[in-house]
């Protein structure tokens, strides 16, 4: 995969549960299909990105903030998993240059962005990207969600990032399309199916309508059952905002513990 497309797609990926791809599951791994899809993502992109910009559900700040650490450490922000999962490595380089470029774009769009020269990568980043790009040789920057979780602002943050797609930067939102931990292990969920059907229709609709629908996602069927908190859905809004006038399509769908989860490509 050499060279660069004129415009890279953007993605929303489910990142699974904790370090789910790197542990034994004695009764069968429920995340196998998601892992297979993530492994195939570089082929779906079609070219090798120059750099990676990832918006994770697991970092919220007062204003949009970027990791500017040239050698970002890992943040093992999960609990109750096997001891070996706390020694996972993903020695990907950071990119202070990309962090500065993103900050300029956000500042120009009216967001008072910041850089954090110390912060590392949380599990919403290093766990899926250890599957997607296991060589850890593409520089990566993480962007936080903005406190308050305003949908319109996160769509606008994405729109401000759109020029990066023509600069070889792959933009990925990392969250979960269904994230209700109290319900997740409770068996088949009609609520997850209802919300997923709405989300897929919204994400794949005409771009202007897509933005209007996603801005009002709280009104969707079973929205607050699927997402008691906003954090795991908002990375999708950033990815959709960065897509501009490009249409979206669902490229992953599976049922995990009875609940529907989906992933999307835009462009």
Image (cartoon, helix red, strand yellow):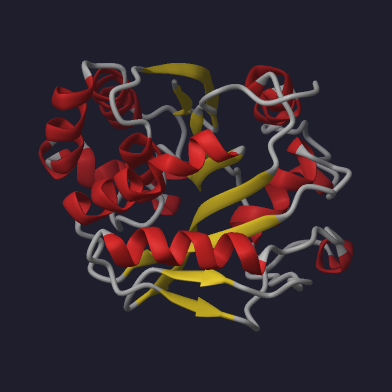
Q: Look at the picture and state if 185 lies above or below 246.
A: below
Task: Judge left or right: residue 211 versus residue 90.
Answer: left
Q: What residue is drawn where x is 85% and y is 42%?
A: 134
Whether residue 151 is visible to the viewer of this picture, yes or no, is yes
Q: Nearer the viewer, residue 238 or 131?
A: 238
Q: Quadrant of residue 178?
A: top left
- Residue 187: image x %, image y %? 46, 33
- Residue 241: image x %, image y %? 31, 39
Task: Judge left or right: residue 69 versus residue 219.
Answer: right
Task: Judge left or right: residue 168 versus residue 1.
Answer: left
Give the residue at the far bottom of this rendering: 118
Q: What residue is drawn where x is 30% and y is 44%?
A: 159
Q: Quadrant of residue 131?
A: top right
Whether residue 18 is visible to the viewer of this picture, yes or no, is no
Q: Quadrant of the C terminus?
A: top left
Q: What residue is drawn where x is 26% and y is 17%?
A: 201
* Number of callouts: 0
């Amino acid at each position: 995969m050499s060279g660069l497309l004129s415009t890279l797609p953007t993605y929303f990926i489910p990142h699974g549960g904790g370090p789910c791809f790197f542990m034994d599951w004695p009764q069968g791994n429920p995340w196998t299909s998601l892992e297979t899809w993530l492994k195939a993502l570089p082929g779906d992109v079609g070219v090798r990105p120059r750099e990676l910009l990832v918006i994770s559900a697991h970092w919220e700040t007062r204003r949009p903030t970027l990791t500017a650490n040239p050698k970002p450490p890992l943040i093992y922000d999960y609990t109750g998993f096997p001891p070996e999962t706390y020694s996972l490595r993903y020695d990907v380089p950071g990119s202070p240059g990309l962090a500065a470029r993103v900050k300029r774009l956000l500042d120009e769009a009216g967001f008072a962005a910041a850089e954090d020269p110390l912060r590392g990568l949380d599990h919403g980043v290093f766990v899926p990207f250890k599957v997607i790009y296991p060589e850890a040789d593409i520089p990566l920057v993480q962007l936080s969600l903005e406190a308050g979780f305003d949908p319109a602002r996160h769509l606008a943050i994405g729109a401000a990032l759109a020029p990066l797609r023509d600069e070889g930067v792959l933009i990925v939102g990392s969250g979960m399309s269904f994230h209700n931990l109290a319900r997740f292990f409770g068996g088949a969920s009609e609520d997850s199916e209802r919300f997923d059907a709405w989300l897929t229709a919204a994400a794949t609709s005409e771009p202007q309508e897509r933005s209007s629908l996603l801005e009002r996602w709280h009104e969707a069927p079973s929205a607050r059952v699927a997402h008691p908190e906003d954090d795991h859905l908002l990375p999708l809004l950033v990815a959709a905002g960065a897509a501009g006038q490009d249409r979206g399509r669902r490229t992953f769908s599976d049922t995990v513990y009875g609940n529907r989860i989906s992933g999307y490509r835009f462009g």
